[in-house]
Image (cartoon, rainbow, N blue to C red):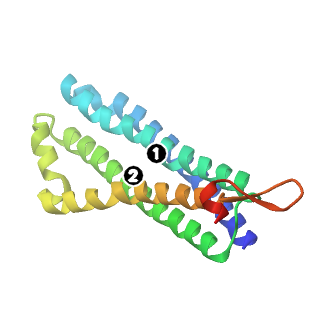
């Protein structure tokens, strides 16, 4: 069980590193496009399109790098003090997989939206921003609503679930002598 928990921690760190690289790449793309593409775009369109790309850069760094690193270090820090059993490790792994799926989907949607605006504005600078927004996801607002309604709650739920599992696992902490002692009156039975 300890080995699977260690594998989860390593996966968290690897995922964080990949997302850090992706976040830095999006930051570079954002800066590059602002210098090259935005020269011919009106200022109000520049601000809107640049906002999508710059917030995407920040979201990738926070959701993809910082949060998984916090999860990895927190899990590594408490793994010796957590009441480890097969079910708890399995739930931690499932919670993190849900977090990865939700965060990757959310970041993919943000990337799609940011790049879609850039491409549309670079093709026709006179196109209204409302028309570009309406054209997202091939103009299918129902699909857009469904996909956003799945992505955001999935990673938020998984993050809360992950910390809840850790919290419950800390119900019994070993003392220095090695004998377990309860943390609260409820855990005394």
- In front: 82, or 72? 82
Residue lying at 38% horizontally and 60% vertically, measured from the top left: 154
For marks 2 and 1, the one nearer the N-term is: 1
> Would residue 37 appear left or right of 103 to someone viewing this image?
left
Relative vertical location of residue 156 with respect to residue 50 in this rendering, above or below: below
Query: Which quarter of the rendered picture does the C terminus lie within?
Result: bottom right
Q: Position of residue 131 (x, y in %)?
A: 10, 44
Residue 135, compared with residue 126, is above or below; it is below
User: Residue 60: which numbered mark, if any?
Assistant: 1
Q: Closest to the observer: 173 or 92?
A: 173
Query: Distance of mark 2 from mark 1, alpha carbons?
Result: 7 Å
Asked if disc 2 and disc 1 are in contact, CB closer than 8 Å, the reply is: yes
Between 105 and 133, the one lying in front of the other is 105
Left/right placement of residue 38 relative to residue 1 reads left
- Residue at disc 2, secondary structure: helix
Q: Residues within 10 Å of mark 1 (few under 14, many from 20)?
A: many
**Quadrant holding the N terminus:** bottom right
- The picture places residue 168, in percent across and down from the top left corner, at 59, 60
**At x 42% / y 32%, what residue is drawn?**
31
Query: Is the residue 84 above or below the residue 148 in the image?
Result: below
Q: Picture coordinates of residue 188 (x, y %)?
A: 67, 62
Quarter occupied by residue 29: top left
Which residue matches tag 2?
Answer: 107
């Amino acid at each position: 069980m300890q080995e699977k928990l260690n594998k989860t921690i390593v996966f968290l760190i690897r995922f964080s590193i990949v997302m850090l690289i992706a976040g830095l790449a999006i930051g570079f793309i954002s800066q590059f496009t602002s210098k090259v593409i935005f020269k011919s775009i009106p200022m109000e369109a520049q601000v809107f399109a640049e906002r999508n790309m710059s917030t995407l850069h920040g979201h990738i760094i926070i959701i993809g790098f910082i949060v998984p690193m916090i999860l990895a270090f927190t899990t590594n820090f408490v793994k010796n003090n957590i009441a480890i059993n097969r079910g708890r490790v399995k739930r931690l792994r499932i919670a993190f997989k849900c977090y990865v799926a939700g965060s990757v989907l959310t970041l993919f949607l943000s990337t799609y939206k940011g790049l879609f605006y850039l491409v549309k504005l670079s093709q026709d600078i006179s196109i209204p921003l409302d028309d570009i927004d309406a054209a997202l996801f091939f103009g299918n607002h129902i699909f857009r609503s469904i996909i956003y309604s799945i992505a955001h709650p999935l990673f938020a739920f998984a993050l809360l679930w992950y910390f809840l599992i850790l919290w419950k696992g800390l119900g019994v902490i070993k003392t220095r002598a090695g004998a377990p002692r309860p943390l609260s009156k409820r855990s005394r039975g």
